[in-house]
Image: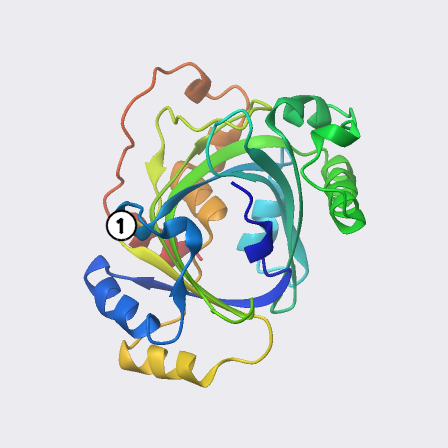
């Protein structure tokens, strides 16, 4: 599944935590302005799975920058949507400059993920692109990774319902549900999870994304549903729940058998108090 054509490379993001009971009415409102993303058509709950492997330093440099509200910061992650051998894995840098989000990524074959993270540049046929900007994105990823000595720290997964502009890529609205995170220290883009925690459960993250100006109808949406903008970082939210010590490579999470996800009572309230 290649989703690069839907990626807004430079954009603004506004996040809101909403109750599941609100989403149906919000969806009806959105359907008057946007259309369902192709990847959600025909899927249960109009959603597709999203997986991310986050890389960070041993001191959790990128997490600390987010918690401290550093204006110019970045995250390093591998983004993928399934574990099929022929599907791409995207090396992605998500940067923030003041209030603007910049995303750059490059898709590669799954079997070169571990060698690439260990310093081996893929052969041309192992890329899903031949565009120089994508190669530059991968070089930037590796430069930042080496700069902070980043290694895999966490596997994040959720279900995404996405609504997009039918005319261009200037507006995108997403609902993210069942957000889970667990420590993960291997150079592998896995799908199964061992013992994750639910982050922000039972709330849903609603994101309003736009590349130029704030659309007038976004303001109508916010007012009609009495939405309150909120911090809702999936990676840092999970770390705040589990504690930074859980992301040490000696963590017992690498040794436990697979188990159903664990819901933490009051998780959303706990994270909001910390942010």
The quadrant of the rendering that contains the C terminus is bottom left
Q: Nearer the viewer, residue 241 or 256?
A: 256
Residue assigned mark 1:
45
Q: Nearer the viewer, residue 177 or 42?
A: 42
Q: Residue at x 34, y 49 (%)?
A: 47
Q: What secondary structure is found at the residue carrying circle 1?
A: helix
The colouring scheme, among rainbow, by chain, secondary structure or one colour, is: rainbow
In this view, 240 is above or below 213: above
Q: Residue at x 55, y 69 (%)?
A: 168
Q: Position of residue 39 (x, y in %)?
A: 42, 49
**Residue at the outermost left position:** 21
Lateral position of residue 112 relative to residue 54, left or right: right
Q: Residue at x 56, y 54 (%)?
A: 66
In this view, 169 is above or below 203: below
Q: Residue at x 41, y 78 (%)?
A: 218
Q: Position of residue 4 (x, y in %)?
A: 60, 50
In this view, 99 is above or below 199: below
Mark 1: few/some/many CA within 10 Å (<14, 14-19, 20+): few
Q: Position of residue 170 (x, y in %)?
A: 56, 70
Q: For residue 151, which quarter of the picture? A: top right
Q: Nearer the viewer, residue 131 or 174?
A: 131
Q: Position of residue 65 (x, y in %)?
A: 61, 52
């Amino acid at each position: 599944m290649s989703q690069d054509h839907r990626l807004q490379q430079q954009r603004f993001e506004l996040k809101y935590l909403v109750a599941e009971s609100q989403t149906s009415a919000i969806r009806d409102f959105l359907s008057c302005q946007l259309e369902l993303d192709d990847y959600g058509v025909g899927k249960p709950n109009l959603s597709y799975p999203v997986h991310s492997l986050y890389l960070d330093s041993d001191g959790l440099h990128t997490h600390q920058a987010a918690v401290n509200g550093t204006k110019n910061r970045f995250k390093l992650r591998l983004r993928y949507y399934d574990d099929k051998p022929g599907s791409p894995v995207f090396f992605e840098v998500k940067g923030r400059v003041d209030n603007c989000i910049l995303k750059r990524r490059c898709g590669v074959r799954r079997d070169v993920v571990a060698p690439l993270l260990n310093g081996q540049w893929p052969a041309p046929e192992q890329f899903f692109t031949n565009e120089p900007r994508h190669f530059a994105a991968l070089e930037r990823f590796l430069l930042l990774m080496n700069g902070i000595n980043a290694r895999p720290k966490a596997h994040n997964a959720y279900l995404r319902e996405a609504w997009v502009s039918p005319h261009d890529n200037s507006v995108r609205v997403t609902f993210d549900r069942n957000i889970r995170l667990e420590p993960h220290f291997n150079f592998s883009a896995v799908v199964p999870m061992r013992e994750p925690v639910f982050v922000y459960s039972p709330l849903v993250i609603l994101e309003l994304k736009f590349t130029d100006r704030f659309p007038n109808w976004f303001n109508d949406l916010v007012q009609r549903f009495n939405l309150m903008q909120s911090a809702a970082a999936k990676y840092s939210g999970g770390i705040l729940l589990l504690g930074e010590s859980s992301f040490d490579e000696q963590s017992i999470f690498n040794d436990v058998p697979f188990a159903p996800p664990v819901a933490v009572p009051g998780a959303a309230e706990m994270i909001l108090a910390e942010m």
